[in-house]
């Protein structure tokens, strides 16, 4: 009888130990996967062929990633404006509407402009779905809102989590001069990306998300 009682106690002790381990594991949580820490899409980085062609270059990066198709920036310039394939391609800037029109001519879903309210969930959801995004930035020359040096498009293609700091990877497009320079690939803190502080060098006006084919 005493032996049975000890056996029963042993079983109870083992059960309590298992429950304790499960509880502690649940509190600690599963280890973060690599995709939750650093996730960068394999995109092709291009340079601008003209000083005002950041819009066509952003399209070039995105469409190449989504469809595998390569087109010249001149052709994307035409797509943005609904021009014939033989139309000239002057060095003009593009609007957000024209960039989305250019996407619509090349992929099934030309995305949605999110305004300046891009969230971390937006970033992670799009990158995990292999959907690069396009940012539209205002470039101030000083801390006065009315002093604007210009506007610029660039492609967002990844994210990184480093402790409590969140980063977005972007592809910038320097203009080809002489023998050319490498396309700029860098990352920016999410807090900086969303900040309205003009001292950061740019102000996000809009972000185009949910682009896919």
Image: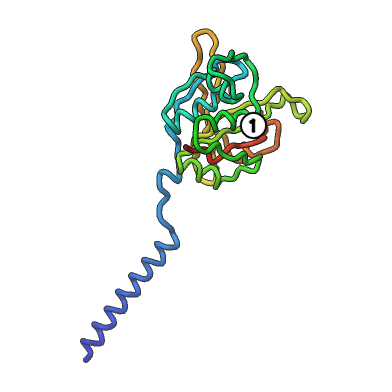
Q: Which residue corresponds to the image point at 41% horizontal and 67% vertical from the top-left?
A: 23
Task: Return the residue nearer the eye: 77 or 85.
Answer: 85
Quarter of the rendering occupied by the N terminus: bottom left
Eyeballing the image, is 48 above or below 40?
A: above
For residue 198, which quarter of the picture?
top right
Task: Return the residue nearer the eye: 96 or 164.
Answer: 96
Left or right, 65 with respect to 155, comes to left
Residue 176 in the image: x percent, y percent? 54, 13
Q: Which residue corresponds to the image point at 61% horizontal and 37% vertical from the top-left?
A: 207
State the residue position of label 1.
97
Left or right, 147 with respect to 89, comes to right
* Kind of element beneath mark 1: helix
Circle 1: is it few (<14), some (14-19), or many (20+) Cα within 10 Å? few
Residue 40 in the image: x percent, y percent? 45, 36
Left or right, 195 with respect to 40, comes to right
Residue located farthest toward the bottom when viewing the structure as drawn = 1
Eyeballing the image, is 32 above or below 11?
A: above
Residue 173 in the image: x percent, y percent? 55, 22
For residue 197, which quarter of the picture?
top right
Task: Return the residue nearer the eye: 28 or 64.
Answer: 64
Residue 52 in the image: x percent, y percent? 62, 18
Count how many numbered circles sit on residues in the image.
Answer: 1
Eyeballing the image, is 76 above or below 31?
A: above
């Amino acid at each position: 009888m005493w032996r049975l009682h000890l056996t029963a106690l042993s079983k109870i002790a083992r059960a309590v130990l298992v429950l304790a381990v499960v509880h502690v594991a649940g509190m600690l949580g599963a280890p973060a996967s690599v995709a939750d820490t650093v996730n960068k899409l394999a995109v092709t980085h291009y340079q601008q062929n003209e000083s005002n062609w950041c819009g066509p270059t952003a399209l070039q990066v995105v469409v190449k990633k989504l469809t595998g198709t390569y087109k010249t920036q001149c052709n994307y310039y035409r797509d943005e404006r609904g021009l014939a394939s033989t139309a000239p391609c002057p060095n003009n800037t593009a609007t957000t509407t024209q960039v989305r029109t250019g996407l619509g001519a090349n992929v099934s879903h030309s995305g949605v402009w999110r305004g300046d309210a891009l969230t971390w969930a937006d970033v992670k959801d799009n990158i995990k779905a292999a959907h690069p995004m396009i940012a539209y930035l205002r470039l101030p020359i000083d801390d006065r809102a009315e002093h604007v040096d210009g506007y610029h498009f660039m492609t967002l293609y990844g994210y990184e989590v480093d402790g409590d700091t969140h980063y977005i990877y972007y592809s910038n497009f320097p203009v080809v001069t002489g023998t050319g320079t490498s396309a700029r690939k860098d990352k920016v803190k999410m807090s900086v990306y969303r900040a309205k502080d003009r001292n950061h060098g740019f102000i996000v006006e809009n972000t185009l998300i949910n682009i896919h084919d």
